[in-house]
Image (cartoon, grey):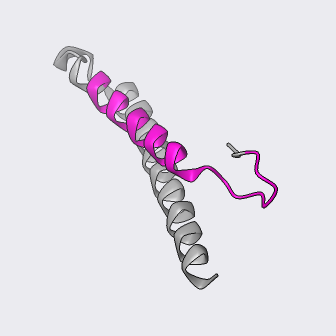
Amino acid sequence: MTSGDDMGERDVIPELAAAIDELRSLLRAFDDVRPSDMDERFYLHAYNELDLAGRTVIDAFDRERDTDEGLWRK
């Protein structure tokens, strides 16, 4: 996501918020799974989904932090 400004700064705040919303949605979906459906395949898939969502949140947070640090140095 880019903000479209001439400086090429990323619009990272909505990116972080979107990543957090996606993680929340994933966790809610896990709540809807019946225990009888929690087989090996479920856990493999859930781990991969959770890993991806967590990494996306961390990456978005890092970009926001890096952008904020860059603004302080200017």
Residue 44: tell me if it is visible.
Answer: no
* Left or right of 60 on screen, residue 20: left
In depth, the one of 2 and 5 nearer the eye is 5
From the image, which quarter does the N terminus lie in? top right
For the stretch drawn in magenta, what is the main secondary structure? Answer: helix
The residue located at (34%, 33%) in the rendering is: 43
Residue 37: tell me if it is visible.
Answer: yes
The quadrant holding residue 73 is bottom right
* Left or right of 64 on screen, residue 9: right
User: Which residue lies most toward the left here?
Assistant: 35
- Position of residue 10 measured from the top left corner of the image (x, y, whole percent): 66, 54
In depth, the one of 52 and 74 nearer the eye is 74
The residue located at (76%, 51%) in the rendering is: 5
From the image, which quarter does the C terminus lie in? bottom right
Q: Which residues are magenta?
A: 4-29
Q: Is residue 4 above or below residue 43?
A: below
